[in-house]
Image (cartoon, grey):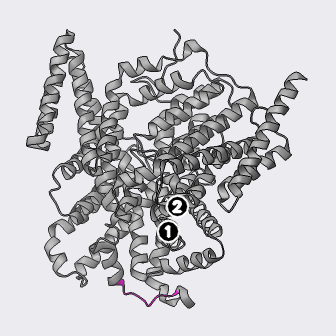
Amino acid sequence: MAELNLHAHAPGETPPAGEEFQEHGVQRKLGGSTLKIIVAVALLFSTYQLIVAAFHPLSSLVIRSLHVGFLLAMTFLLYPGLKSGKLSSIPWHDWLLAAGGFGLATYHWIFEADLIQRAGDPTTADMVVGTLMVVMVFEAARRILGLALPIVCATFLMYGLFGQYLPGSLAHRGYGFDQIVGQLFTGTEGIFGIPAMVSATYIFLFILFGAFLEHAGMINLFNSLALGLVGGAKGGPAKVAVISSGFMGTISGSGVANVLTVGQFTIPLMKRFGYSSVFAGAVEATASMGGQIMPPVMGAVAFIMAETLNVPYVEIVKAAVIPAVLYYCTAFWMVHLEAGRGGLSGLPKDQCPNPWTALKKNWYLVLPLAALVGMLFHGFTPMFAGMTGLALTAILILGAAIAASLSTQAFRYVFWLGIGLGTAAFKWFGIYSILAVIAVLALTCLKVQGGKKTLHAIKMSLVDGAKQALPVGIACTIVGVIIGVLTLTGAASSFAGFILEVGEKSLFLSLLLTMIVCLILGMGIPTIPNYIITSSIAAPALLKLGVPLIVSHMFVFYFGIMADLTPPVALAAFAAASIAKASPMKIGFKATQIAIAGFVIPYMAVYSPELMLQGEWTIPAVVYVVFKALLAITLWGAASVGYMFAPLKPAERVVCALAALLLVAALPITDEVGFALSAAFFMWHVWQKRRLALA
């Protein structure tokens, strides 16, 4: 059987040009002893985070501070100050910045007791260290995230320093430089606030978890399953991209990372079977961005949201699961319509692997994911569940390498039984038993064939995890400036008041205003700061207008993700463009068109909170609203593409859009009229198709 190669590129080969895309700044390409130092720092960073997760040996503020220190050190070592700078070596001033950034981060650790005693009365040393730390965070953010976010944060900082000179209600009472520095540096409401805490705990663990599963071969399994399930259907290659990206979304919370991993396989596949470069890139970008809302491993925002709202992470997962599935239904339906309109067929059967064979061969890779989901839904904290999932993944990777070297099946059964008993000792000896099992397996791997290669994969997973954590961690740190200023000045209440004023006339206009703010902010800044700014300002106002708390935050989160697809700053589109060899702008606009049917989902959740399992929901109510959402997506997609079972005339597209709008509106009798109009349209369209077929 001539099956497709499911790997992006074989081990040892030069990666395709697409992998040269840098999601966050220009990264240095180092070698020799410099590279060894970078790897050592990355391993230290990951080890520190694992110790924090397993033993929590330090106070919360010190954990956050040292986390930021590692972020600064690695950012200054990996990212040059200027794009035109030399990429093959690190200049002396960046070594100095890296050492200084980490050194200053130890200030909270060394002077912890003194800082607590003189809280609110900073010394000159506190002011100098705090100022330098904030400046370094801004510089690190500029290098890794570009200018947009530092400019937004600097605007808020300027408001904190000089806002008393503004006219009317925009002005605040005025704050001294020492108050601003104290707010941003010495406490937990500035750069070491909730986002930094979440980055230092949950987010890093889940990034590591995804990196370990990727190195274990999870991407290959996802591609095999997607190809086997939908590869032969109409428009199969594009549907493979949607399904595979959906699977990838369960273990990765980064949309751009999903594009650069799954897209290496799916975009060339789509192009090979007749899809244009722009459409292939847009499908992958759209499907990959959904990874941020796909449980169980959602984007960093989900963890920040759980901490901000003071609810268990599982509540966020519960609220996200139906919208996430509907998002992928949207993408799947849109590519199905495009395939129908373009007459694109599926893959030949002999090129589609058997999904059950792939699952049978690599079933054990699903175990850590299943354990993670089970633990989250049984009330364990994300920290504990993530650590357990990570430990289980490491045990499976190391164990599989050893089991492969055993000669008979009986020995393998005994071996896995022994590992099971060893890990079961966790009940009595805690994390020490798990660490002992991993240590024994690692030492055994040194002696078996292929074991050293497995240990290298584990090492690179730790290094990759640390590198992947940099952009998220720096974003979480610098948005602390916004939170600190908003908390100190109370500025958020002014805009919230405006939204409340609009909402008295129309809730829909308030939602529309919030969506526009999300989309405009998202053109220049990543999802995390977008969510933090908009939710700080708009979510409390929406709550007062009767929107449930989690629903209002999810509304903001959802459109923050959509903003990553909208040009001019559409990171997912830029990543896809590097592989598809097409214009990022064209891909961004096409991706927005593909995702547009999904814009109805957050609005429906506001008017029918059952869609997010909020309020007094019942199973019949959930089934009804999901059916209504699917019907609205179906009609909206057909109106957007101009095709359903056959091409649609302009008048038919208008009827489709009107029926979808009525289903979303949730006003008296709009559902009934929407269903009646939908039924009439479907009957008319089927009749028209049959009439054309007979003609």
Above or below, comparing residue 557 to residue 294 in the picture = below
Query: Is 427 on the left or on the right of 11, as rendered?
Result: left
- Considering only order in the chain, which callout, 1 or 2, is on the residue closer to the N terminus? 1
- Residue at image coords 46%, 70%: 536
Alpha carbons under labels 2 and 1: distance apart: 8 Å
- Residue at image coords 83%, 32%: 687
Label 2: state its secondary structure: helix
* Coordinates of residue 47 in the picture (x, y in percent): 21, 46
- Residue at image coords 25%, 44%: 387
* Coordinates of residue 623 in the picture (x, y in percent): 54, 45
In the image, 475 versus 551, the foreground residue is 551
Q: Is residue 577 visible?
A: no
Label 1: state its secondary structure: helix
- Residue at image coords 33%, 36%: 370
Q: Is residue 456 visible?
A: yes
Image quadrant of residue 603? bottom right
Query: Is 458 on the left or on the right of 58, as rendered?
Result: right
* Coordinates of residue 248 in the picture (x, y in percent): 45, 37
Query: Is 638 on the left or on the right of 32, as rendered?
Result: right
Amino acid type of the residue that numbered disc 1 sits on in the rendered structure:
Ala
Residue beneath disc 2: 556
Query: Is 190 on the left or on the right of 600, as rendered?
Result: left
For the magenta stretch, what is the residue range? 171-177
Residue beneath disc 1: 539
* Coordinates of residue 607 in the picture (x, y in percent): 58, 60
In the image, 651 versus 620, the foreground residue is 620
Cβ atoms at labels 2 and 1 below 8 Å apart = yes
In the image, 420 versus 666, the foreground residue is 666
Amino acid type of the residue that numbered disc 2 sits on in the rendered structure:
Val
For the C terminus, the image quarter is top right
Tell which residue pokes out farthest to the right in this image.
695
